[in-house]
Structure formats: C-alpha cells, structure tokens
Amino acid sequence: KDYYSTHPHLQKKDDQLRSLIPLLKPGSKYHDAIITGKARRLFNEIDEIRVDNELVEKYVNYIKAKKSISKPIKEIIIELGGVAAGFTDLDQEFVYSHKGRFDSDYGTRIQLQHPHVIVFLVEMDYSNMQAAPKAHTIFESARQYYKAASISKIVEKIVQQIGFDAKAHYDAHYDLILPPLAIKAGLGELGRNNILIANKYGSRVRIGAISTNIPLEYNKPVPLGADKFCAVCKKCSDNCPSRALTSNGKLVVNGVQKWPTNVEKCYAIWRKYGTDCGICMATCPFSHKNNLLHNTIRFIVKHFPLFNRLMVYLDDLIYGKKWKINDQ
C-alpha cells in the first residue's frame, strides 16, 4: 500500500504479474518437482548458512602472514569457489536508498558508509545453462546464489576478525547494486542483455560482494570489447522469448545510456516458464566454455572489433542463430 501510494501507475501491471503462477510452484510450463524442489531448498537455506570458525581462523592467520591484504583476499575467494575478484571504491550511487524486501524493516533508510567494496564472481555451470529456460536454470541460479552467499559470509567474518568492519551482500540481502560495482572492479562489461559479461565466462556468472573499511588496492575497469560486439551481435535480443530486450540502439535510462530492458515482459516469461529463463545468458557468444578456442575468439573480439560481424557469423554457423528449446 505504501509503495503504490507513490507509484499508482505501476499497480495494474504488477497485479497482472502477481496473478501468474509464482516461481518454483507447480503449473508453470517447465516446472519439475524434483529439480525445482532442490532449488527451493537452496534458496531457503541461504539465511541458515553458518560460517566455520576454524576455517575463518585459518584464513585470518594466512592474511596476517602476508605483507599485503588485497592479494590474499583474492586468493581466498578463489579457493572458496569464486572465479574472479576485484576491489573498488563504494560509490554511493550504487547503494540502495531504503530496505524493501521484508515487512520487518520495510522503508528503513540504508546507511552504508563503507569506503570500499570487495566484488567477486561465481560461475554458472555451462551444461545447466544450456538447458535454458527449463528448471535446470533456476536450480543453477540457486546453487550459485548459495555459493556467493557462503563466500560473502566467510569473507565478512575474516575481515571482522582482522579488526575491520565488513558487511556481506547476498541474495535477498543486497544493499548494493552489484553489476556497476563489478564493472568498476574490473570484472567485466555490461551487455545488451543488461547482465554483466565477464572475461572467460560471459553472462554465466553471479555476483557477490562485501563492503568494508579494510584498505584495499583498487582494480580498474577492464575493456573486453563486449560493448562494440553487442552492438552488432543482438543474439540475446533476437532470441528473447518475451521480446524484453531491444535490438535497437542505446537509450538514456534513469540518467544512464544503455540498452533498455522491459523488466515486466522479462519477469512475465519467468512466471510462465516457472524459471528465471536464462536464454539471454546461454545464447550470449561470450558465455561459451572457458577453453583455448573460445578464449582466442574473446581475444580477437577485444583487440580487433573489425572482425565482430565475422565472429557473429561463425557463432551462428556453429551454434545456430536461433535458440532451440527441447521440450521432449
């Protein structure tokens, strides 16, 4: 009621979305009782994650034995299951203004004054994402949200044990907008699908973060050539079943020039499928396997954008222009 008192124009559309079958519930097109049940349990167990104090102590001693702080923190994140990590300043533009997820603290103003943020990535399994938009995709999302939450909580505790302040940000408990911070921390670029495109993994990543006052050596944004490639590729928008992604040029959205996403159309297809779809992640040429062949192509895209159209043609030739959904 509070939200629609100030956003009345959104209520009709939102009510239509709410009338659809909820995610992870029976009746949707790709509901699978076993796989969906596993996903639901993982999401429910995120808040129950407990940190192993002996593990934390081991890592605290490891950091104390080193001359720097930044490098061992990255090493720990990778050892815990992350695939990349970076550090940047915590721009207040990327901090949410108010709590809104739960009734218990709805409307509470977020006061997050940490100057730094640790951002990291976990990889979504290639095979599971190739099943998009079936139940495997939401199971894979649950797996990686759980892993990211676990890593965030462990690193939070490590930093606190060293004597600094820290706050983990994970599923349902984000005070931060993570994609722009990941870009600032040198972990990728924003794609046409409005999802982070990471080096070696493309859109097949989930992001975790820990805000802190521990001194860190910042990373810089790293160009991957994704912006120029996305301009000619359009594979995600061409294959989006809800037509939520544009095939046209960028627009200014909330003061930022980017490719727009119709989020209501996107979420409506989630409810129809009963999963978080994932086709735009799976069909992205950057999301192919992390191997010598694809990393060579990524190198060409990064350094020789003149060949982008040829790379798109070859990708269509090998992987197909249209995403095929096997309903058997």
Image: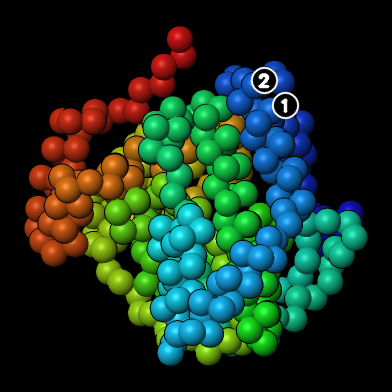
Q: Is residue 221 left or right of residue 55?
A: left
Q: Is residue 200 left or right of residue 292?
A: right
> Mark 2, residues whose alpha carbon is within 10 Å: few (<14), some, or many (≥20)?
few
Residue type beneath disc 1: Lys
Where's residue 144, x and y in %? 55, 47
Q: Label 2, on which residue?
A: 33
Identity of the residue drawn at 22% across and 46% down: 291
Dot in front, 2 or 1: 2
Query: Which corner quadrant holds the C terminus?
Result: top left
Q: Residue at x 23, y 62 (%)?
A: 225
Position of the N terminus, as image quadrant, is: bottom right
Question: Does residue 294 appear left or right of residue 269 in this picture?
Answer: left
303 or 155, nearer to the observer:
155
Residue, x 76% and y 70% (percent of image)? 98
Name the N-terminal-most of marks 2 and 1. 1
Give coordinates of residue 146: x percent, y percent: 62, 49
Q: Quadrant of residue 66?
A: bottom left
Residue under label 1, please give it. Answer: 25
Q: Is residue 128 visible?
A: yes
For the residue pair 238 and 291, the one nearer the viewer reads as 291
Which kind of residue does numbered mark 2 sit on? Ala
Q: Secondary structure at mark 2?
A: helix
Where 90 sits versus 146, above or below? below
